[in-house]
Image (spheres, rainbow, N blue to C red):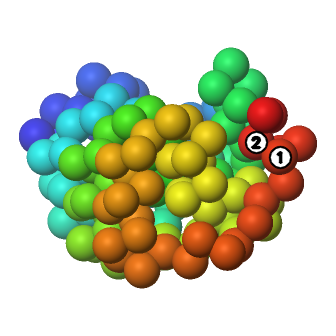
Amino acid sequence: MVARFLHDNIFERVTDRDTRGWSPLCYAVVQGDAVLVKALLDSKADANDQILCNKLEATLRRKAPVLSLAVAYHNNEVAKVLIAARANIHGGAGKPGTALCWAASSNNASAVRILCEANADPHIKASWAILGS
C-alpha cells in the first residue's frame, strides 16, 4: 500500500518532500485514509511531521503539524491514528496554533472531543490572525 501510494504521488521515500514542502504523510492525512496513514507511520513516517510551506487556500500555515491538518479537514479517524502514534497534541502551540485550535476554528466538535480526551490543554492560545479568522 505504501509503495503504491509513494509511486502514484511521485515520492521515493516516506520522508521525501515535494516542491510545496509536503510529505507523503501530509497528503495521506488530508486524503483522510486512516489505514494508509497507519501504514506510513509503520514505515517510519513522523507522526509529528509538519507542512513546510503555506497552503493559503485552506489558511494552513508553515509548520502546521499533520495532526492539525487532520482535524482541519475533519479527518478524525486519522487524528486518532496520529494520537495513538504519539503525535504531539500541543504541536504548533502559539503559531500556527495547536490541533485543538484548528479543530475549534474548523467547527469540528468531534475532533475537539477527541483531543480533550487525549488531554489537550484548552488554555494554549493561538493568534487569530495566524488562523485567518
Hey, which quadrant is residue 46 in on the image? bottom left
Along the viewing direction, whichever of 54 and 45 lies nearer the viewer: 54
Q: Amino acid at mark 2?
A: Leu
Q: Which mark is residue 131?
A: 2
Q: Residues within 10 Å of mark 1 (few under 14, many from 20)?
A: some
Contact, mark 1 vs mark 2 (Cβ under 8 Å): yes
Percent coordinates x, y for residue 57 in the rendering: 68, 19
> Between marks 1 and 2, how big is the CA–CA gap?
5 Å
Q: Is residue 103 left or right of residue 42?
A: right
Hey, which quadrant is residue 114 in on the image? bottom left
Percent coordinates x, y for residue 33 in the rendering: 21, 37
Residue for badge 1:
128
* Number of numbered discs visible in the structure rendering: 2
Percent coordinates x, y for residue 18 in the rendering: 56, 35
Q: Is residue 59 at all visible to an observer of this figure?
A: yes
Q: Residue at x 25, y 72 (%)?
A: 84
Q: Is residue 125 placed above or below 56 in the rendered structure?
A: below
Q: Residue at x 13, y 46 (%)?
A: 35
| Residue at the farthest right position | 129
Along the viewing direction, whichever of 98 and 48 lies nearer the viewer: 98
Q: Which mark is residue 89?
A: none
Q: Amino acid at mark 1?
A: Trp
Q: Residue at x 54, y 59 (%)?
A: 100
| Residue at the farthest top position | 57
Q: Is residue 105 left or right of residue 70?
A: right
Q: Secondary structure at mark 2?
A: helix
Percent coordinates x, y for residue 19 in the rendering: 65, 32
Q: Is residue 69 at all visible to an observer of this figure?
A: no
- The quadrant of the image that shows the N terminus is top left
- The quadrant of the image that shows the C terminus is top right
Q: Secondary structure at mark 1?
A: helix
